[in-house]
Amino acid sequence: MPHSNVRLVGFGKPEGDDAPSVVLSQAAIKGASTKLVTDSSRSNLGQIDQGSIDWREYLEGTHWLVISTSTSLAGNSARSAWGASMAFAELEGSKTVMIVDLPEDPERLAEAWGNTIERIRQVHVLFITQDALSKISQLEGVDEHNLLQEIRQRGLVPHVCGFTESNMVQVEHSLGSSKANTHPSISETTWLARFLCELPSSGPGSDGIKSAAVSAGIAD
């Protein structure tokens, strides 16, 4: 499948500087079709009119819904829209990608992670950023090296991934575990964007996942 046939919808800040926005930007560079859903008045997500978002329209024919844990902390309206996006993604056949990132106030990570745990069965790809990995490990009481596997097994998430070392990404999945080296120029969000572009056409099974992970880490 050409990358131009891959469609991603994200829910993020109107400024376009949060993790979902960056992933969409990087996917667009690879030729994917992207759409950022945000506050129509371009003020802030805390004031968003979540009832006016037509998630069915946005998600129809979309492969991936890209959201982050931090977005759930932007206010009640933002959290409602965040939850609704996952519910409609299930209905429309889109797969939810959850980025577990460190919020602006790191003290609220436990709250953001708790919001995610409540809906983890709706998540298809869970990506934990490096700066959040050790802190989630502490919250869960699980050794950092075993965290991705433990979360996948507990939450039954099809793909749980993150950079466990510099220039090394790990993907835990139902068929096992895959590791891939990444070029130093490839950031976390760039790798994730490319992985999402590659995965729909990488083929079935663990070989397909490995192929997508490796391809995503190769510099242009």
Image (cartoon, grey):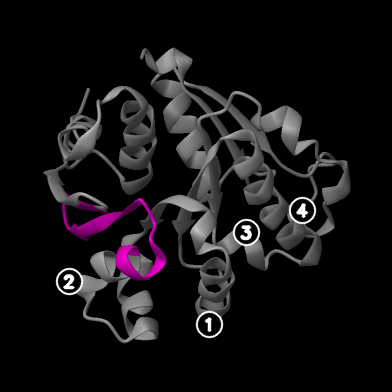
Q: Is residue 34 left or right of residue 202?
A: right
Q: Which residue is mark 2?
A: 145
Q: Which residues are magenta?
A: 152-172
Number of residues whose C-alpha sits closer than 10 Å to that of mark 1, classed few (under 14), some (14–19) or many (20 or more): few
Q: Which amino acid type is marked by label 4? A: Asn
Quote the CA–CA distance across marks 3 and 4: 11 Å
**Marked residue nearer the N-terminal end (3 or 1):** 3
**Closer to the eye: label 3 or 4:** 3
User: Mark 3: which amino acid?
Assistant: Thr
Disc 1: which residue: 107
Query: Can you identify the residue that label 3 sits on?
Result: 71
Q: Nearer the viewer, mark 2 or mark 4?
A: 2
Q: Is residue 46 left or right of residue 67?
A: right
Magenta span includes 170: yes
At horizontal 31% and vertical 66% (from top left) the residue drawn is 153
Q: CA distance from mark 1 to mark 2?
A: 23 Å
- Residue 161 lies in quadrant: bottom left
Q: Secondary structure at mark 4?
A: loop
Does the magenta-highlighted stretch encompass residue 65?
no
Residue at the spot of label 4: 44
> Height in image: 43 above or below 75?
above
